Image (cartoon, rainbow, N blue to C red):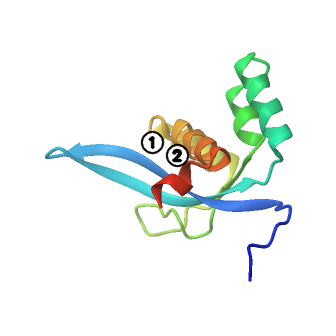
């Protein structure tokens, strides 16, 4: 059976964020997120608006980022760190550049970058 072609409302993707280097080896935080399934036209418009400075960073991220999957991140006490705008802000405070890693993962997802890795 061939690949089923259909519009997806959302899809899952991996985010990787280097949080430290130890003896020349990166310690990488990896977690699964959900992105909105945008059409190519929507992606193009979003990127143009961002490049033109018409969106804040939060507006840009909010246009495609739906959050991380349940159970992907936990607090130090093993309590689940569920997705919310407040927890995204906290994650950004704890791990500088994490939003950029999420954006980088999204750009990879809409440009076919993941297929090259596989």
Q: Is residue 92 left or right of residue 33?
A: left
Vertically, is 28 above or below 8?
A: above
Task: Identify residue for label 1.
Answer: 94
- On screen, 5 above or below 56? below
Query: Foreground: 47 or 18?
Result: 47
What x and y, as percent, mark residue 83? 65, 57
Residue drawn at (56%, 46%) of the image: 105
Residue 6 at x, y = what percent?
A: 85, 65
Count of all numbered marks drawn on residues in the image:
2
Q: Residue at 35% of width from left, 45% of height from top?
A: 19
- In contact (CB < 8 Å): disc 2 and disc 1: yes
Residue, disc 2: 91
Neighbour class for label 2 at 10 Å: few (<14), some, many (≥20)?
some
Q: From the viewer's perspective, is 24 left or right of 73? A: left
Tell me which residue sits at (82%, 67%) in the image.
5
- Image quarter (top left, top right, bottom left or bottom right) of the N terminus: bottom right
> Hey, which quadrant is residue 46 in on the image?
top right
Could you say whether the residue bearing mark 1 is in a helix, strand or loop? Answer: helix
Residue extending farthest to the left is 23
| Residue found at the far front of this picture | 2
Q: Position of residue 17 (x, y in %)?
A: 43, 47
Residue pictured at 84% horizontal, 39% vertical:
42
**Residue count near mark 1 (Cα–Cα under 10 Å), binned few <14, some 14–19, many ≥20:** few
Image quadrant of residue 13?
Answer: bottom right
* Cα separation between marks 2 and 1: 5 Å
User: In terms of depth relative to the viewer, which is nearer, 55 or 118?
Assistant: 118
| One can see residue 106 in this view | yes
User: In this rendering, does residue 55 appear at all?
Assistant: no
| Residue sitting nearer the eye, 84 or 22 | 22
- Secondary structure of the residue carrying tag 2 is helix
The disc placed on residue 43 is: none
Q: Is residue 116 above or below residue 12?
A: above
């Amino acid at each position: 059976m061939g690949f089923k072609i259909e519009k997806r409302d959302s899809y899952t993707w991996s985010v990787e964020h280097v949080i430290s280097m130890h003896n020349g080896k990166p310690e990488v935080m990896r977690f699964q997120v959900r992105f909105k399934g945008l059409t190519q036209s929507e992606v193009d418009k979003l990127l143009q608006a961002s490049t033109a400075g018409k969106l804040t960073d939060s507006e840009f991220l909010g246009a495609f980022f739906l959050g991380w999957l349940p159970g992907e991140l936990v607090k130090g006490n093993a309590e689940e760190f569920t997705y919310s705008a407040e927890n995204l802000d906290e994650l950004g405070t704890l791990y500088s550049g994490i939003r950029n890693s999420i954006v980088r993962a999204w750009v990879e997802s809409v440009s076919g970058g993941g297929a090259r890795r596989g």
